[in-house]
Image (cartoon, rainbow, N blue to C red):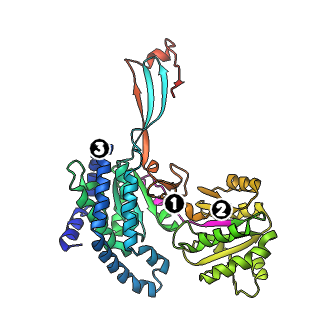
Amino acid sequence: MSQQTRAQLQADNASVASIARRARAASRELAKLSTETRNEVLKAAAKAIEGGRQRILDANERDCRAAEPAVAAGKLTPAMLARLRVSGGGINLMAWQVRQVAGLENPLGRRLSATELDDGLTLYRESCPFGVIGVVFESRPDVVTQIVSLALKSGNAVILKGGSEAAQTNETLVAIWRECLSCFPAVPVDAINLLQTRADVMDLLTQDREVDLIIPRGSYELVRFIMEHSRIPVLGHGDGLCHVYVDKAADMKKAIDITYDAKVQYPAVCNSAETLLVHEAIAGEFLPQVVAKLKKAGVEIRGDSKTRSLLPNDAIVPATEADWASEYLDLVLSVKVVANLDEAIEHINRYGSRHTDAIVTEDSDAARRFMNEVDSAGVYQNASTRFSDGFRYGFGAELGISTSKLHARGPMGLEGLTTYKYKLYGDGHTVGEYSTGEKKFKHRRIE
C-alpha cells in the first residue's frame, strides 16, 4: 500500500463518530441500488482482488514477518500465524467467493408473509438491510472479503476492525475494495470502513444511533467484552468447542476418517473438533487405530483415565477438567470414554460452545436423539464438523458462525444480514371502526 493511500485511510478514520455517520448515509444509498448494480460491483471487486494480488501478498508478508517474534515469544500462537498467512491460492479463493456471492439470489425485498387484515387492508412483511454493521475480528484477513461481499450484496454498510497482527493486509484489502467502489458513481465508498486502534473499537461501541449491529469474531473474551460494553445489539461469533462422538454402532472406517478430518484437516479454525467422545463398547477397538493415525499427523492426545488405560504405551497426556472446556485451535485433542449416549449428550451440553457437534453411528434412533437433544447450531450424523461453514452450506461466503439463538444461528450468510419491515396498504382505514365493532378483522393469510 502506498504512503498516500495509507494516509488517506488514516485521515478518513480521524473520528469514529464521523465514520459511523458517513456509513449511515452510505447505507441509505446502498438500499436504493438495484440487484444488477450490486452484482456488477461485486464482479468488479473480484477482478480488482485478482489484479491486486501482489499488493496483498506483499502486505501479508510484512504482517507475517512482524508477527514471527510474537510467536517466538509465545505471545501469538502458531495457529494464529497460520490463520494470518495469505497465499496466492487464498487470493484466488477470495475472488471466487465474491463471484459466488454475486450469483446468489437477491436477499432484499423478499415477501416473507402477507395477511389480509380486512377488505382493502393488507399487511406484508418484507426483508430489508440492517443498515450499518460493525465487525470486530481477529487474525484472518480473508474475513474482510467475505464480510464486505455479503454486506454489499445485502445492502449494508460495514465498519471493520481487524487484529493488529493483520493490519497491513487488512488495509490493503479495504483500499482495493474502496478503489473499486469509486468507479461506480452510485455507490458511496463510505460503505466500507476500516478502524485502526483498540480505542476506535471502544468508540464504535458507543455509536448506537448510527450502528445497527455489532458482530465480534474471535475469542470468548472478545465476544463477552463487547456484549458488556455496548448498547448496540451484538451477535456473537464465539468459541468453537466442537465434539465428535463415536457411538457403539459406528462404522469403524467412517469414525476414523471423520475424527481425523475434523481434527487434522485444518485445526486452526473454529469448526475443527477439540474433544472426541467414544462409547466404551467400541473404545477398545477404535481408540488404538484412531490414535495411531492422529499421532502420525502430530496430534497430541489428552485422555481421561479410561482412555489412558486402553492405551498404556501411547504416552497419553492426562486430561484435566480445563481440557474439556478448551478450544485448542491446534493439533491437540482431548479424548473421553463414555458409558452411553446419555453421557455423551450431557458432556457436550455441559462443556460445548453450541457450535457444531457430530455423532458417528449407524443407529438411526441414536442419531435422532443426538440431533434433537444436543443444543448446538449444527448437529451432524456421519459427517465431519468441518462442514460447518457458509461456503460449504451454499451461502457463497459467511460473516461468521453464530452460537447464539437470536437472530441468526450457525453459519451466517446473506439472510443473517437482513431484517424485515412491515408494510401496510390501506384505503382510508382507521382503527376506530374496529374498536367500536363497526368492522371486524379477517386476518386471512395470503399464500
* Drawn side of residue 438 relative to residue 65, left or right: right
Q: Residue at x 34, y 61 (%)?
A: 203
Residue denoted by label 1: 389
Label 3: few (<14), some (14–19) or many (≥20) C-alpha neighbours in 10 Å? some
Indicate yes or no whether the magenta region holds residue 104: no
* Residue lying at the far front of the rendered structure: 253
Q: Describe the element under mark 2 as helix, strand or loop.
A: strand
Q: Which segment is the magenta one? A: 226-244
The vertical placement of 207 against 421, above or below, is below
Q: Which residue is mark 2?
A: 358
Q: Using the rendered view, name the quadrant where residue 278 is placed.
A: bottom right
Dot 2 or dot 1, earlier in sequence: 2
Residue at 32 percent across and 60 percent down: it is 46
Residue 262 image position (x, y, % from top left): 60, 69
- Asked if disc 2 and disc 3 are in contact, CB closer than 8 Å, the reply is no
* Amino acid tagged 2: Ala
Check disc 3 and give the amino acid type.
Leu
- Per the model, the C-alpha gap separating discs 2 and 1 is 14 Å
Residue on which the image places disc 3: 33
The reply to whether residue 196 is in sight is: no
Residue at the image point whose x is 47% and y is 66% from the top = 218
At label 1, which amino acid type do we have? Asp
Q: CA distance from mark 2 to mark 3?
A: 42 Å
Please state which of residues 211 and 254 is positioned toward the viewer in this rendering.
Answer: 254
> Residue 5 appears in which quarter of the rendering?
bottom left
Counting residues from the start of the chain, the first of labels 2 and 3 encountered is: 3
- Tell me what residue is drawn at x 37 percent, y 80 percent: 64
Q: Quadrant of the N terminus?
A: bottom left
